[in-house]
């Protein structure tokens, strides 16, 4: 049975454990955007012993590069949609083991490395349906700050205050379940049934 949850950041272990694949989630509080270059810099900072600009414990990271503008001296998000999350797969270990992140938001599949880290450290991967930018941008109440703008606006870390950010779908939960693996298994099962029927 699909459940719906409204969660407040920072997320706790209990928040994460109750989520199951296909559940619907809305996020309230603070989320952080981070794409390829931000992940690379995070890795470099950790290896060099440098302090990161934010505390990611219990955090939600959104794989996105927002469109922004300044109005009356304040940053404003004009559009924000998910980018392909699989590119961040190589950073899965440090995101969960070193930073203590509890949830990732993105689009597309993430692999077995992420699945194992979500299970080991307690986290979830949430997918934001592609093409939903016009809807979810309305959930952004305020841009609180930004870091590493030298990487470019889309690649910087943006700290966003959100209210009912979503709807998001649990694609990989903390119990080792993956909607992607389930779909793949169902497809292979159907193909095998077709092959068997054709032989008959």
Image (spheres, helix red, strand yellow):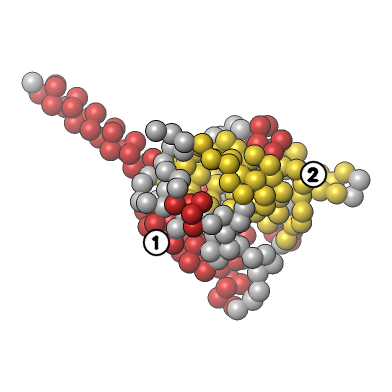
Query: Which residue is disc 2 drawn over?
Result: 76
Q: Residue at x 65, y 69 (%)?
A: 52
Is 189 situated left or right of 10 in this image? left
Which dot marks residue 120? 1
Using the image as rendered, state which of residue 147 and residue 21 is in the foreground: 21
Q: Position of residue 175 (x, y in %)?
A: 37, 51
Which dot marks residue 38? none
Q: Quadrant of residue 168?
A: top right
Q: Position of residue 78 (x, y in %)?
A: 75, 38
Mark 1, Cα crowd under 10 Å, few <14 / some 14-19 / many 20+, is some
Q: Is mark 1 on a helix, strand or loop?
A: helix
| Residue 182 visible in the snapshot | yes
Residue at the extreme front of the image, as rendered: 14
Q: Where is residue 21 in the image (x, y as percent from the top left)?
A: 41, 41
Using the image as rendered, state which of residue 89 and residue 29 is in the foreground: 29
**How far apart are the alpha carbons under marks 1 and 2?**
37 Å
Q: Is mark 2 on a helix, strand or loop?
A: strand
Q: In which quarter of the image is residue 46?
A: bottom right
Q: Residue at x 55, y 47 (%)?
A: 105
**For the residues bearing labels 1 and 2, Cβ distance under 8 angstroms:** no
Q: Quadrant of the N terminus?
A: top left
Is 111 situated left or right of 49 in this image? left
Q: Where is residue 126 in the image (x, y as percent from the top left)?
A: 51, 44
Please determine whether, in this image, residue 127 is positioned above or below residue 159.
above
Mark 2, Cα crowd under 10 Å, few <14 / some 14-19 / many 20+, is some
Q: Which of marks 1 and 2 is nearer the N terminus?
A: 2
Q: Residue at x 74, y 57 (%)?
A: 146
Please determine whether, in this image, residue 83 is positioned above or below residue 130.
below
Q: Residue at x 69, y 67 (%)?
A: 53
Task: Give the mark toward the camera: 1 or 2.
Answer: 1
Q: Quadrant of the C terminus?
A: top left
């Amino acid at each position: 049975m699909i459940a719906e949850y409204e969660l407040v950041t920072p997320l706790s272990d209990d928040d994460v454990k109750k989520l199951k694949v296909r559940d619907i989630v809305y996020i309230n509080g603070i989320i952080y955007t981070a794409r390829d270059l931000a992940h690379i810099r995070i890795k470099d900072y950790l290896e060099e012993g440098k302090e990161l600009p934010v505390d990611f414990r219990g955090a939600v990271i959104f794989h996105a590069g927002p469109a922004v503008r300044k109005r009356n001296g304040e940053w404003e998000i004009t559009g924000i949609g998910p980018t392909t999350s699989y590119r961040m797969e190589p950073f899965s270990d440090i995101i969960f083991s070193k930073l203590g992140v509890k949830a990732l938001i993105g689009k597309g599949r993430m692999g077995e490395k992420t699945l194992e880290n979500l299970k080991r450290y307690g986290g979830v991967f949430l997918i934001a349906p592609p093409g939903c930018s016009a809807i979810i941008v309305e959930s952004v109440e305020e841009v609180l700050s930004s870091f590493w703008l030298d990487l470019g606006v889309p690649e910087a870390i943006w700290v966003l205050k959100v209210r009912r950010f979503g709807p998001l779908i649990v694609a990989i939960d903390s119990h080792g379940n993956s909607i992607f693996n389930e779909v793949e298994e169902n497809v292979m099962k159907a193909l095998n049934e077709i092959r068997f029927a054709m032989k008959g």
